[in-house]
Amino acid sequence: MNDLIKKGFLLGLGAAVTSKEKFDQKLKELVDQNELTQEEAKSVMQGFMDKGEMKKDEWNSKQYEQAQKFAKDIGLATKEDINELRARITQLEAMLDKNDL
């Protein structure tokens, strides 16, 4: 499963790099044909890069959610579960200490 995810990620990364190169080449052609100014091309490219960052953040968020769901489905304790248990243990220890007095 992990190998499949890795291959999918690399495939997506390769597609993104290829797309960026083609997009950059197309912008250069438009500048050469005086259909866009250099500043407009930079602005369009920055918008493209910003959108890519936004999509990357969305993908990371979805991957995190899926990992959390997978951990829950197979019964692994999450960091939140462990912290909750620690808090409960601390609370119980405090109650025991009160009763010993």
Image (cartoon, helix red, strand yellow):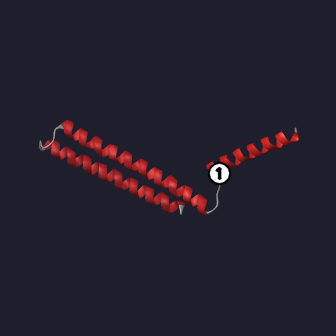
Near-viewer residue (1 or 66):
66
Near-viewer residue (86 or 40):
86
Residue at 44 percent across and 60 percent down: it is 8
Residue at 35 percent across and 47 percent down: it is 52
| Residue 4, percent from left and from top | 49, 62
Q: Quadrant of the C terminus?
A: top right
Dot 1 alpha-carbon crowd within 10 angstroms: few under 14, some 14 to 19, many 20 or more: few
Residue at 21 percent across and 49 percent down: it is 26
Q: Amino acid at mark 1?
A: Asp
| Residue 69, percent from left and from top | 55, 59
Residue at 70 percent across and 44 percent down: it is 87
Q: Residue beneath label 1, please?
A: 81
Quadrant in the rendering for residue 12: bottom left
Extreme left residue here?
34
Q: Secondary structure at mark 1?
A: helix
Near-viewer residue (10 or 76):
76
Above/below status of 66 relative to 39: below
| Residue 93, percent from left and from top | 79, 43
Near-viewer residue (81 or 56):
81
* Number of numbered tags placed on the structure image: 1
Extreme top residue here?
39
Q: Is residue 79 left or right of residue 16?
A: right
